[in-house]
Amino acid sequence: MNLRQIVAAVRNPKNEEDERTSNRRFPGKDCAWRTAVKFSGLRAKSQRKRSAVVTRRSRLVAGNWKMHGSRASNGALLQAVLAGLPRESGAEVVVCPPYPYLQQVSERLAGTSIAWGAQNLSEHGSGAYTGEVSAAMIKELGCRYVIVGHSERRTLYGETDAQVAAKFAAARAAGLTPIACVGETLAEREAGRTEEVVARQLHAMLEKADFGAAVLAYEPVWAIGTGRNATPGEAQAVHAFLRRQLSPDVRILYGGSVKAQNAAAIFAMPDVDGGLIGGASLAAGEFIEIVRAAQ
Ligand code: PEP
């Protein structure tokens, strides 16, 4: 069965036959993909039970600071965000600074409601990998989260699906929560290949590790840092497609030019559980409004 057929099977659960056929299609008792497809069948069979589960998903807004900041500007940004966040925020908030500032951020945020994470990690445990940072090191800095497979890593640094999957597995094994990014380029969207691409990227990770409590981020490449966001409907369609392949309680974030002004409409979509925010996470006022929109 090729990837297009897998995508078709997930899109249309009616095409799933019985367990016997499913076993033929996905041989191997540990095939995470078969489990994922079975979830889509579950959805069709037990919509009521599924919606009960869905309501348990908590909202999450994660700020990806990318390669921005200084000790002074980080301090001011965190101060403003902490002061402006609603006391009883219904959404979990995370910031992901560059590596050198994780210590500063961990000291400033310890004991607050904001968690922190890294933007990348090595797929290796330790060794002669100059310039790399392991999952254990990130964990030691108190990180709960780590972004994996961001499109800038894929396109600028040539990270392959296999490498992203190895990083995903390393993060899971270390007890970190990966924020695993998938998304199509504009050319892939225009060629009608969005589902095929995001399924391939997700599938690579599911082959290496259970998804567990990891977070998925749908980030169309054409919307990242461009000011052109997916419409709420476009985001919802891909999120619903991705959700059919995972446990119903997996949180799926949207990322790509989310701003205070468009966040509420995107977060109102039933399968959008929050956002991965780049540029707007560097402006305290914008970020706070986006968190408010997620509640
Ligand atoms: C990102 O970097 O993950 C991102 C979504 O960036 P931006 O919000 O700036 O588009």
Image: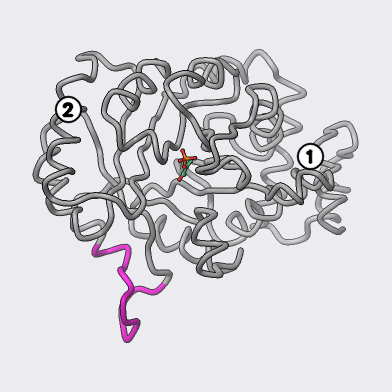
**Gap between marks 1 and 2 measured at Cα:** 44 Å
Identify which residue, 285 or 238, lies in the foreground: 285
Residue 216 numbered tag = none
**Which mark's residue is nearer the viewer, 1 or 2?**
2
| Residue 224 forms part of the magenta stretch | no
Residue denoted by label 1: 10
Q: Position of residue 251 (x, y in %)?
A: 50, 33
Residue type at mark 2?
Answer: Ala
- 77 horizontally vs 119: left or right: left
Name the spot of residue 267 as percent of width and height, x first.
Answer: 52, 20
Residue in front for this viewpoint, 205 or 247? 205
Q: x and y percent of residue 138 in the render?
A: 26, 59
- Residue 17 placement, left or right of 138: right
Mark 2 is surrounded, within 10 Å at the Cα level, by few (under 14), some (14 to 19) or many (20 or more) other residues, namely: some
Residue ID at (85%, 51%): 4
The answer to whether residue 140 is above or below residue 14 is: below
Q: Is residue 249 left or right of residue 90?
A: right
Q: What's drawn in magenta, residue-wise?
A: 124-137
Q: How is the image coloured?
A: one colour
Secondary structure beneath dot 2 equals helix
The residue labelled by disc 2 is 80
Classified by dominant secondary structure, the portion drawn in magenta counts as: loop
Q: What amino acid is at disc 1?
A: Val
Q: Residue furthest front?
A: 227
For the residues bearing labels 1 and 2, Cβ distance under 8 angstroms: no
